[in-house]
Image: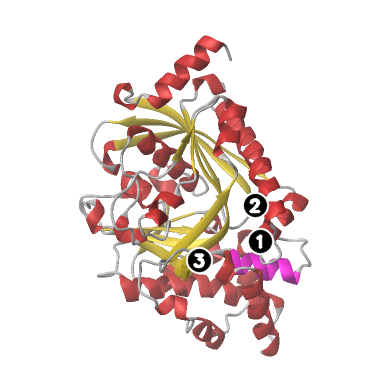
Amino acid sequence: MSDATSDARRRRGCDSEEVGERTVVGLMSGTSLDGVDAACCRIRRDGEGPRGYDVSVESFVTCPYDAAFRERIATACGEAGTVATACELNVALGAVFAGAAEDAADAAGLSLADVDAVGSHGQTIRHVPEPQSLPVGDDRLRSTLQIGDGSVVAERTGVPTVADFRTADVAVGGHGAPLVPFADIALLADDTCFRVAQNVGGIANCTALPPDPTRGDVSAFDTGPGNMVVDGVVELLTDGERTYDRDGRLARAGTVDEALVEECLDDDYFRSEPPKSTGRERFGRAYAREFLDACRARNLSDEDAVATATALTARSVADAYRRFLPRPPDEVVVSGGGAYNPELVGMLDDAVDAEVRTIDQYGVGADEKEAVAFALLAAAAMDGVPNNVPEATGASRPVVMGKRCPPQ
């Protein structure tokens, strides 16, 4: 890009008072570790709060990780991860994210010079939502770590980048999760309908949107495993040849072990009150191995094991609604990779007393929503608008999440 164009874009990206509309690329790499989702969005602000933002998706791309790189990230997320690995991946993922942002701009018929900002979730490699004792006074603090450095993204793209969103919320006592409620309000809040936005990624999280909500009316939390246990079981059963149950075919061919589902739902996590969040540390590979061992002890077939894991996701979502929502929702809007698993969506439809739809019916693709959310979160950060929802995260107050990284 030319120096003049670059300078103009940088000024426009950082001068929020004069910007009514931005082109923002949102980047998401989630707990499933399958790749980077990138959404190029046109975002206009014409009001206050999250409902003051209007978004249209100009393009969406997914940049999958190859098997070796995915395994390196998975290792970094586990107990075998080292500081050296995290350090190297912090820069390597920044470069991957920058490439995904360029691909999304290109898919929208734009160059990076046309992009005003990039919003990057980063890659979570450690999330510790329960307060821990630290060697600094008497404080017990939560912690979280996302890698894929925003400065690397900014320098490689030449675009102002907002990254590392979770830590601002953690700094004021929150879980740093879930982050998507701001976007859920913008995209799905309705004046008359009690709607739940249910994302099913590696972890499943819900945002309860009462009619005509303000941020104080909204609740959100991680309901438990989304695709993570299903994916982990499939990967173990196939020795890594498959990483997920395509179209729910294995689950459809199996029979759910109801007793095992009930036993799993006795986990303390499902009973604990929101705000709460979870991740790979709790429902990752070790949990999938223990789950499969339990299936083997019951002489379940491979298909039965996958069906039972799928039922665990659906039932844990429904159980969370019964426990923690003020009343049954009118609609459940499903997004994330789980929206493409018809067996999971069908089980969820059977388990909840509500109309279950996928988010595609509301103008956003099921795979797109979380990347779109980080475009919105970045736009709000550039505007200086608080973009956490304290009722969801447990934070003591609203804050502007996201660190701004200008290109040098």
Which residues, given as a range, are shown in magenta? 228-237
- What residue is drawn where x is 56% and y is 35%? 151
Seen from the viewer's position, the closer of residues 8 and 104 is: 8
Task: Give the amino acid at mark 1.
Answer: Tyr
> In this picture, is 101 found above or below 234?
above
Depth check, mark 2 against mark 3: the one in front is 3
On the image, numbered disc 2 is attached to which residue? Answer: 34
**For the residues bearing labels 2 and 1, Cβ distance under 8 angstroms:** yes
Q: Is residue 76 visible?
A: yes
On the image, numbered disc 3 is attached to which residue? Answer: 135
Task: Give the amino acid at mark 2.
Answer: Asp
Residue 149 magenta: no
Q: Percent from the top left, x then y, of residue 204?
A: 48, 63
Label 2 CA crowd tier, 10 Å (few <14, some 14–19, many 20+): some
Of the numbered discs 2 and 1, the one sitting upstream in the chain is 2
User: In screen coordinates, is 251 left or right of 186?
Assistant: right
Depth check, mark 3 against mark 1: the one in front is 3
Mark drawn on residue 244:
1
Q: Is residue 341 visible?
A: no
Of the numbered discs 3 and 1, the one sitting upstream in the chain is 3
User: In screen coordinates, is 230 left or right of 378?
Assistant: right
